[in-house]
């Protein structure tokens, strides 16, 4: 419960007038914090100047904390969406109180009380007095600091909710904070911040113990993939390497600490448990005092059955860094969230405009999952209505007229052990939606004319459609959406990304490593709308790479091909909807010839206007004569 402003006013008055604190007017945590501030020699009415590290130190700390920071950024974006209203800021700091990242709305960023809240600022108690970040870092537990509970008056119109993030070894890995003005505070914010911190902790646990067998368990099956599930990391010999906080609570009193054995805790042979986990997604597990759990092995395909030789197959990739640019922190956060979800075999739904890279993100999910099976992409809009089940689930020989000799295993079986990517899920026929929903109930397929068989796939879907509108109009099933979007992410359109320059250079490097973009060319390109997003930019860069005037593409070359933003497309160029030459050389030659006609057949003027050499104009004219 938040303290009354009257009691806080009284505490402030006694501190100001008498130089001491009334213990009965402050909570124990706030009282102790204020006493620490007084002991440090801080004056409540004369706060010291904010301390901010230089950019190099900030970058170094961000790099040092890259893993926990990536996980934190993902949760920060989720928190920012969950906390309704305005005047909110979500922040992540190191265990020492150095602020690394901030996500806030403009109303909070512009507020005078937020002037010191920026990346690189230090929020320890000895600098900023009693505050959410600094006090949580000192106490190593969650805390709410509301209004005048702050030691310094400059922060008295803030409410700060902070929680520490613990690494698997028990050390504090960072601090998560949600701050708002006092009028915008929400009662559920504390619970949301605590849940986000737990999510990050579980992500750290899974990453640190990726090489071990990861067991998730709970006494209620519906909670198996929630934050309340226990996590155990066990090596291939059955020795427990670590247990998360939830596991220690669920196994209270049992020897589940590092160094003990699986058999010390559960009434099951470890080898039998692992083998059963490869056959079934879930199984029953009983601990040594008779408590019943539902358990699953999250990464069982990384390990062979205990009594068999390892199955042959490609080695899972060690490096799951995406093969695309993700320098924008918002995209980096999505990349991290998708990787964690894929490793846990959680269905992922990727939304975004056409050309934003949804399939690339799906392939990143497949790589991050460490699954050894194939990546199978299915265009839902292109599946023939009458043969949907046969295409997806396969069929036996002679199952229907025209069936292939020997039958077909189907796309779902083809993806067994790997990833099934359902592209254009919003255009999926209603008949297919019902079929897919049945599959998601038990993860089994029944080939046409055959018998049921289980498949193990990571399911990733993508769409550029408005699924909420499709549900409202009866074109998409809401129950199916809830099964597909355990994790839902939305890729930013290119025009909103902060890493446009990096994307452009990356794409051009793949097209022709010998060509570069000048800064003014990048600036000119960045001003365009890019309705086709990255795919459109790639095509434009491919055409620009045909420039024969040297290895550097400048702004003039961009204007020649795509036109400057501040003038309309010349009438001599094809308008939208008209046919365009399909050969890139022909596109460039057509532009040269049209400009040559506009300048009254003046070669010098044509070259100057297009920013190309006279030789390029000559070559275009010779091509016309040929």
Image (cartoon, rainbow, N blue to C red):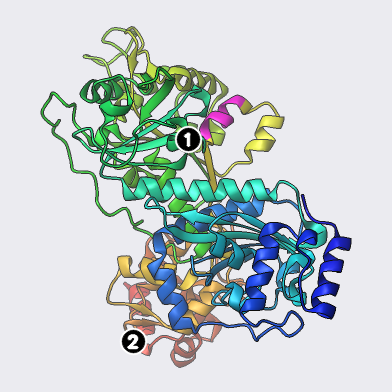
> Which quarter of the rendering shows the C terminus?
bottom left
**Residue 613 appearing in the image:** yes
Q: Is residue 422 above or below residue 34?
A: above
Q: Is residue 577 above or below residue 11?
A: above
x, y percentage for residue 412? 35, 25
**Tag of residue 209:** none
Q: Is residue 223 above or below residue 166?
A: above
x, y percentage for residue 182? 80, 61
State the image quarter where residue 287 is shown: top left
Seen as rendered, the residue at the extreme right is 6
> Residue shown at 61%/79% (left/top)?
40
| Pointer 2 local density, CA inside 10 Å: few below 14, some 14–19, many at least 20 | few
Q: Is residue 265 shown left or right of residue 429? A: left
Mark 1 and mark 2 in contact? Answer it, CB < 8 Å. Answer: no
> Residue shown at 39%/25% (left/top)?
295
Magenta extent:
479-484
* Viewer-nearest of discs 1 and 2: 1
Q: Which residue is mark 2?
A: 615
Separation of disc 1 and disc 2 at Cα?
Answer: 78 Å
State the image quarter where residue 142 is shown: bottom right
Q: Is residue 222 shown left or right of residue 3? A: left
Seen as rendered, the residue at the extreme bottom is 604
x, y percentage for residue 43? 71, 82
Q: Is residue 626 shown left or right of residue 437? A: left
């Amino acid at each position: 419960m938040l303290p009354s402003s009257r009691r806080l006013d009284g505490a402030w008055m006694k501190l100001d007038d008498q130089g001491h604190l009334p213990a009965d007017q402050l909570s124990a945590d706030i009282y102790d914090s204020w006493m620490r501030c007084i002991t440090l020699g801080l004056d409540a009415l004369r706060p010291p100047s904010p301390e901010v590290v230089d950019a190099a130190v900030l970058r170094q700390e961000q790099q040092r904390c890259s893993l926990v920071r990536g996980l934190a950024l993902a949760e920060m974006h989720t928190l920012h969406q969950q906390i309704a209203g305005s005047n909110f800021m979500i922040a992540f700091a190191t265990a020492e109180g150095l602020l690394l990242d901030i996500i806030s709305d403009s109303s909070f960023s512009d507020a005078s009380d937020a002037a010191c809240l920026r990346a690189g600022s230090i929020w320890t108690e000895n600098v900023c007095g009693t505050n959410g970040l600094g006090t949580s870092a000192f106490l190593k537990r969650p805390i709410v600091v509301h209004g005048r509970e702050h030691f310094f008056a400059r922060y008295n119109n803030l409410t700060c909710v902070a929680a520490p993030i613990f690494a698997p070894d028990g050390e504090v890995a960072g601090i998560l904070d949600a701050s708002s003005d006092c009028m915008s505070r929400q009662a559920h914010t504390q619970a949301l911040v605590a849940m986000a911190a737990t999510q990050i902790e579980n992500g750290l646990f899974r990453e640190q113990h990726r090489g071990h067998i990861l067991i998730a368990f709970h006494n209620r099956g519906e909670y198996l993939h929630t934050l309340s599930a226990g996590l155990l990391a066990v090596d291939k010999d059955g020795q427990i390497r670590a247990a998360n906080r939830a596991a220690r609570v669920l196994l209270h009193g049992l020897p589940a600490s590092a160094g003990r054995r699986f058999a010390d805790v559960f009434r099951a042979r470890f080898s039998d448990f692992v083998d059963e986990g490869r056959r079934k997604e879930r199984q029953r597990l009983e601990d040594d005092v008779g408590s019943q759990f539902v358990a699953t092995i999250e990464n069982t395909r990384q390990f062979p059955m205990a009594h068999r030789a390892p199955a042959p197959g490609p080695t899972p990739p060690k490096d799951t860094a995406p093969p695309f640019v993700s320098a924008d922190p918002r995209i980096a956060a999505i990349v991290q969230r998708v990787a964690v979800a894929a490793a846990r075999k959680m269905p992922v739904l990727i939304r975004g405009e056409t050309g934003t890279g949804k399939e690339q993100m799906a392939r990143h999910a497949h790589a991050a999952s460490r699954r050894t099976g194939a990546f199978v992409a299915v265009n839902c809009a292109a599946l023939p209505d009458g043969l949907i089940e046969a295409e997806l689930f396969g069929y036996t020989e002679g199952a229907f007229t025209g069936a292939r000799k020997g039958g077909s295993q189907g796309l779902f079986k083809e993806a067994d052990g790997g990833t099934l990517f359902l592209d254009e899920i919003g255009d999926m026929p209603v008949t297919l939606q019902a079929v897919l929903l049945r599959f998601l109930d038990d993860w089994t397929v029944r080939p046409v004319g055959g018998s049921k068989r289980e498949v193990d796939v990571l399911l990733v879907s993508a769409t550029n459609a408005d699924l909420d509108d499709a549900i409202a109009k009866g074109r998409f099933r809401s129950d199916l959406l809830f099964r597909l979007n355990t994790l839902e992410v939305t890729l930013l359109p290119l025009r909103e990304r902060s890493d446009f320059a990096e994307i452009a250079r990356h794409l051009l490097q793949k097209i022709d490593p010998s060509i570069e973009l000048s800064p003014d060319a990048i600036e000119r390109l960045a001003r365009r709308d890019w309705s086709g997003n990255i795919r459109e930019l790639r095509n434009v860069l491919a055409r620009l790479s045909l420039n024969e005037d040297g290895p550097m593409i400048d702004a003039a070359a961009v204007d020649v091909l795509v036109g400057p933003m501040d003038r309309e497309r010349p009438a001599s160029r094809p308008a939208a909807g008209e046919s365009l030459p399909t050969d890139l050389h022909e596109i460039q030659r057509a532009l040269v010839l049209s400009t040559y006609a506009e300048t009254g057949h003046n070669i010098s003027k044509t070259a100057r206007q297009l920013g190309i050499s006279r030789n390029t104009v000559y070559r275009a004219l010779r091509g016309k004569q040929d």
